[in-house]
Amino acid sequence: MLRFGILSTARIARDAVMPALQDAENCVVTAVASRDMAKARALADRFGAPHAFGSYDEMLASDTIDAVYIPLPTSQHVEWAIKAADAGKHVLVEKPLALKASEIEPLIAARDRNRVMVSEAFMVTYAPVWLKVRELLKEGAIGELKHVQGAFSYFNRDAANMRNIPELGGGALPDIGVYPTIATRFSTGSEPRRVQAVVRRDPDFGTDIYASVKADFGSFEMSFYVATQMANRQVMVFHGTEGYIEVKSPFNADRWGPEEIELSNQKHTVSQIFRFQDSRQYRRQAEAFARAVAGEEADVVTLENSVMNQRFIDAVYRAGQHDGWETV
Ligand SMILES: NC(=O)c1ccc[n+]([C@@H]2O[C@H](COP(=O)([O-])OP(=O)(O)OC[C@H]3O[C@@H](n4cnc5c(N)ncnc54)[C@H](OP(=O)(O)O)[C@@H]3O)[C@@H](O)[C@H]2O)c1
């Protein structure tokens, strides 16, 4: 059993990742750390974790854990991932790992000098729905892929929320822009060459709240938008020469509705629907991470993969400052 310490009492830890770690067959939560000891104790008790710490550093120095899960505000991810690696702990760190691709380089060095596992928590890459999309594309179920279309949006104008605070790493692109990009790169195995973008910011918060992006992948094009002040929506469509794949609720299946793929191929008279129930992407993520730590075969998100995804987002920000293409 890989013993996890949870670094902070974040909502995502409480609602999704800690229950998943407890369900996982090879993980256990043994400690929680918070800037507030009472909050750490309360969350630890709720999940039956024996240890609580009133500071993040204390938990990192402790031998009650082998691995750390980091769901801090985005601007603190790299700093604490490096500290955890230097304390000899394996690190599962929330997305987006960084706010610029270049910030990931010192973390790669920390991973290598400490010989620990460090992985960005892109739960979608463990979800059966995305493994299925990847398989369908590989077997040519829609012919030659020509266009990927994506949308991800929600409405949140809460000034106290991390997503609307620049110093904490807020913004639509860091929070949700990273999902259409990782899902497309994961399922197609291709990398973008250049991008064009419109990026809009909130006049009060200063964070980006909307981005509309066109990306050139060579053999196909991708277009997507993300927004944090529009009604809830999430969808991804892969359109090829012989058909299309539509992924419904592609990112947060449990909260946004049933996880479903529609495959339409012109050789068939009706579409095929693939339904995925209870796909437990957070549990699969935890189990894959623990297998990788144990040296078993597991397809986890590498830091090198994270760099490529972040380069895509970096290029979108640059492209948002002018008309025309930016090289990724
Ligand atoms: N993979 C997913 O599905 C998913 C979903 C949601 C969020 N996320 C990611 O997870 C991370 C956390 O998101 P969240 O919504 O769960 O965050 P949150 O509820 O706001 O929690 C962040 C935690 O960080 C700690 N913290 C340390 N310094 C802080 C500061 N200056 N301001 C506020 N909190 C501070 C706090 O814990 P203590 O007070 O206990 O120290 C707080 O509970 C983000 O990077 C987000 O992108 C991922």
Image (cartoon, grey):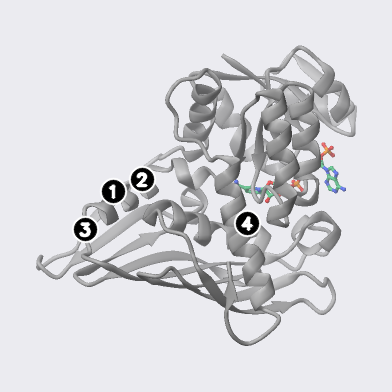
Asked if disc 1 is less than 8 Å from ligand 1, the answer is: no
When the figure is inspected, residue 115 is found, relative to residue 142, above or below; the finding is above
Q: Does residue 113 appear to the left or right of 53 in the view shown?
A: left
Q: Residue at x 80, y 45 (%)?
A: 76
Q: Which mark is residue 131?
A: 2
Q: Which amino acid does the dot numbered 4 rest on? A: Gln
Q: CA distance from mark 4 to mark 2?
A: 22 Å
Which badge, 4 or 1, is on the more N-terminal residue?
1
Total numbered circles: 4
Q: Which residue is mark 4?
A: 310
Examine the image and state in which quarter residue 79 appears: top right
Q: Quadrant location of residue 6?
A: top right
Q: Residue at x 60, y 78 (%)?
A: 197
Q: Quadrant of residue 172?
A: bottom right
Q: Which residue is mark 1?
A: 135
Give the structural element (helix, strand or loop) at label 1. helix
Label whose residue precedes the other's in the sequence (1 or 3): 1
Residue 240 horizontal side relative to residue 15, left or right = left
Tag in front: 4 or 1? 4
Residue type indicated by callout 3:
Gly
> Which mark identifies residue 140?
3
* SS label for mark 2: helix
